[in-house]
Amino acid sequence: MEYVIAIAVLAVVIYYVFFRNDDSSSTISTTPSPVPAPVVADANNNGITSKAELKTLTKVQLFDFAERRSLKVKKSGTKAQVINEIHSQLK
């Protein structure tokens, strides 16, 4: 009788060691980075982007805004200069 129990325990151990499909230890799971939301500068949705609306954006968002509208903007300028360049090109 002890032999049957020993063989059963050995079979369970062999199953868990060799045949268990444990993906968490063999692969590295990576979470995808979130997609940034599109830049919306026209808050009141009237079709005109004012300087006040542009001031609410960060400098990186301003560059993204200019790139989406194919505007030429100097990246070395200050935020105020970038806002002025974008606003003058939108007129």
Image (spheres, rainbow, N blue to C red):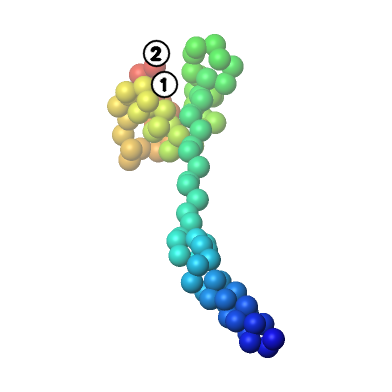
Horizontal relation, residue 64 to residue 57: left or right: left
Q: Is residue 15 above or below residue 31?
A: below
Is residue 81 visible in the rendered image? The answer is: no
Which residue corresponds to mark 2?
91
The residue at 49%/18% (across/down) is: 49
Disc 1 target residue: 87
- Where residue 62 appears, as percent x and y from the top left, is 43, 32
Which percent across, then down, holds residue 76? 33, 40
Residue depicted at x 69% and y 86%: 1
State the residue in front, 23 or 29. Answer: 23
Q: Residue furthest top?
A: 46
Q: Is residue 74 visible?
A: yes
Q: Position of residue 7 (x, y in %)?
A: 60, 81
Name the residue: 33% across, 38% down.
Answer: 75
Q: Residue furthest front?
A: 1
Say if 35 sits above or below 83 in the image: below
In the rendered structure, the answer to whether residue 26 lies left or right of residue 4 reads left
Element class at badge 1: helix
Q: Residue 20's spot in the image, x, y percent?
A: 53, 66
Compared with 17, 80 (above or below) is: above
**Which residue lies at the image location 48% right of the left edge and 29% below the top edge?**
38
Task: Specify the farthest residue to the bottom.
Answer: 2
Relative to 77, is 37 on the left or the right?
right
Along the viewing direction, whichever of 36 and 13 lies nearer the viewer = 13
User: Which residue of the protein is positioned furthest toward the right in this rendering?
Assistant: 1
| Badge 1 amino acid | His
Q: Decide: is 60 above or below 46.
A: below
Marks 1 and 2 close (CB-CB < 8 Å): yes
